[in-house]
Structures are given as C-alpha cells and as structure tokens.
Amino acid sequence: MKKCERCDQPTQTTSMSMFNTDDICHPCQIEEQRHPDYQKAKKVEFEEVKKGNLNFPGIGLPSDLKKKYEFGEIADTINAAKLVHNIMSTQGPSDETSQSS
Ligand SMILES: [Zn+2]
C-alpha cells in the first residue's frame, strides 16, 4: 500500500504535487487545487517545462498550506474527501449485481 508523502495516510493512488515533488493522495490534491496559489504554481511549472526544464521541483508548498498539516486542520478535509470517495465506490457497478438476489 502506498502512502501519501504529505498527510502520511495510506492511499491507493498518488500524484505528483503541483507545488513540490511530493507524491500526494487525492484529498491532498483537492486541497492544493483549492489553494489560491495553485494556478500560479501551474503557470510557473508550465513555463519551466516550456523552457526545457523538465525537472522543475515546483514553487514550494505555500506556508499556510503547510501549517494546515502541522496543526492537523487538514484532517477534516481528508476525512470528508474519503467519505465521498467511499460513497462513490460503493455505488455504481455494484447496483446490477445486487438485483439478482
Ligand atoms: Zn495526502
């Protein structure tokens, strides 16, 4: 099982952070996207890649986002996102099989 490099929670899928080189889980990704600097981080990354710098490490994790993790404020967001994820994964394809009984 993979682990998120940012919140330390076990996760099945990770993606590269837009702010730095952390491999992060989906809830952390949502949290990044909600940050006001996200568009800026994306723009800078794009421009670096355009310049040929494919190993650009990112503009760095914004200090207020970092603080959220230090004070555990992020936990609510992560739990909420997990809940949504669980609800979504229990619905869907399983509907058809449950009808046969
Ligand atoms: Zn995470």
Image (cartoon, grey):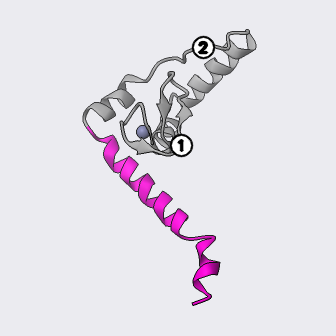
Per the rendering, the mark at residue 13 is: 1
State ligand 1's quadrant. Answer: top left
- For the point 37% across and 53% down, the residue is 79
Residue at the left extreme?
71
Residue type at numbered disc 1: Thr
Please report contact status of discs 2 and 1: CB closer than 8 Å, yes or no: no
Write down the residue under mark 2.
56
Q: Say whether residue 95 is left or right of residue 24.
A: right
In the foreground, 39 or 18: 18
Residue at the bottom extreme?
101
What SS does tag 2 mark? Answer: loop
Q: Was residue 26 drawn as part of the magenta stretch in this picture? A: no
Tell which circle, 2 or 1, labels the residue nearer the N-terminal end. Answer: 1
- For the point 44% across and 53% down, the residue is 81
- For the point 74% across and 14% down, the residue is 50
The segment highlighted magenta reads 72-101
The alpha-carbon separation of the residues under discs 2 and 1 comes to 22 Å
The mark lying in front, picked from 2 and 1, is: 1
Q: Was residue 89 drawn as part of the magenta stretch in this picture? A: yes
